Image: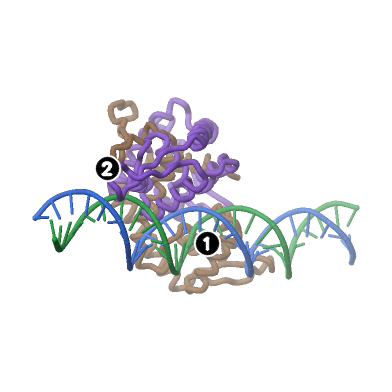
Chain colours: A brown, B purple, C green, D blue
DNA sequence: TTAGATAGTTGTGAAAAGCAATCAATGCAC
DNA sequence: GTGCATTGATTGCTTTTCACAACTATCTAA
């Protein structure tokens, strides 16, 4: 980042005296490692909430909050999980009373999910925590670079998702 | 990416008719989602190998291959896992005969890990698969942008790791 | 020599993640 | 309409992850 032509800011990745650069200078390794760090940080920030731990629950909560009547299969699509996994996430969230299940009016097989009052309050807290993480945790990205970084992330995400489908 | 000043390539992330942009335009969400896609792709590519599945084993194998005599605690440091988790990964790899455990000569508490012949052959295969994934899976990154993308990933990784330690 | 730090193991528990099988409702072909 | 493939969701099962707590053995430094 910073200025794209700067050749001097090529970092050497070394941990514990081990040059892991030599080992696997692979995109995948960095993405996977960053995921671990980000997820842990987010888990800690959410530790006091009933929704803590696990990648699926947060997205599910916010999706139901934004799209009343959304179906489990749509959530599964966004989460890139199979329906059993998604169903179990929903089970737990219904049990803890943050979302509510109804039979879809137009398709008796399907369900329509709705946020509860408690769930909506929770989602507000979650959004605030995410905002905080954005500013605090990613403060190493210069404000003027954020937009570009985000654009790049989105593009990469879309391209990669396309490969998966 | 491409040219950094291009404002028109701002993608709208929409899945299943759901604009997830509005929902959570958060770095963490994209990183976590990309991790899922990359990991799955890698799992599939490695499916025929005994080391398939799980993020820790591949890194462990390559580390032991590159650093004969490396200790479990060092691997734990790189993996950002606790020692029990790392120990169990090593257990399984020793059991399947790809690495070998010895008592460290200078410290009787510690272990020294070495690659076996089979393990080295395996690591060669793994490296080839990673190389393939680099070129095939990340083909959406223009060759001239790769270096910059990688530099950015490394910087982000290092900064984020620093926050964790 | 005793205290505390370090290296690793074992036990436990919660959760993630994928697969196969099942069931009910839907929609299409004929 | 009847039959059949498809879709939406659930249940059961297995494997793996991942963190915490408790423990033993060894090393180091006061």
Measured Cα–Cα span from mark 2 to mark 1: 61 Å
Looking at the rendered structure, which numbered label has been put on residue B106?
A: 2
Task: Tell me the chain of label 2.
Answer: B
Front-most of residues B61 and A25: B61
Name the element at disc 1.
Answer: loop
Above-or-below relation of A162 to A115: above
Q: In which quarter of the image is the N terminus of chain A?
A: top left
Name the element at disc 2.
Answer: loop
Indicate the position of residue C15 as horizontal and vertical percent values: 47, 63
Q: Is label 2 or label 1 in front?
A: 2
- In which image quadrant can residue B153 be found? top left
Residue B49 seen from this side: yes
Indicate the position of residue D8 as horizontal and vertical percent values: 65, 62
The tally of labels here is 2
Crowd around label 2: few <14 · some 14–19 · many ≥20 (10 Å): few
On the image, numbered disc 1 is attached to which residue?
A: A67
Front-most of residues A65 and B104: B104
Front-most of residues B5 and C4: C4
Crowd around label 1: few <14 · some 14–19 · many ≥20 (10 Å): some
Indicate the position of residue A103 as horizontal and vertical percent values: 63, 71
Indicate the position of residue B133 as horizontal and vertical percent values: 52, 35
């Amino acid at each position: 980042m910073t200025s794209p032509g700067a050749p001097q800011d090529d970092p050497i990745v070394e941990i514990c005296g081990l040059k892991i650069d030599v080992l696997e200078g692979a995109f995948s390794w960095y993405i996977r490692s960053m995921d671990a760090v980000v997820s842990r940080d987010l888990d800690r920030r959410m530790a006091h909430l009933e929704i803590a731990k696990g990648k699926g629950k947060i997205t599910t909560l916010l999706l139901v909050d934004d799209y009343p009547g959304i179906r489990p299969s749509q959530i599964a699509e966004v989460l890139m999980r199979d329906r059993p996994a998604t169903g179990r996430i929903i089970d737990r969230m219904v049990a803890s009373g943050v979302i509510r299940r109804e039979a879809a009016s137009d398709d008796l097989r399907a369900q329509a999910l709705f946020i509860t009052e408690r769930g909506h309050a929770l989602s507000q807290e979650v959004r605030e925590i995410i905002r905080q993480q954005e500013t605090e945790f990613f403060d190493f990205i210069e404000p003027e670079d954020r937009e570009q970084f985000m654009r790049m992330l989105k593009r990469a995400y879309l391209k990669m998702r396309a490969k998966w489908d």
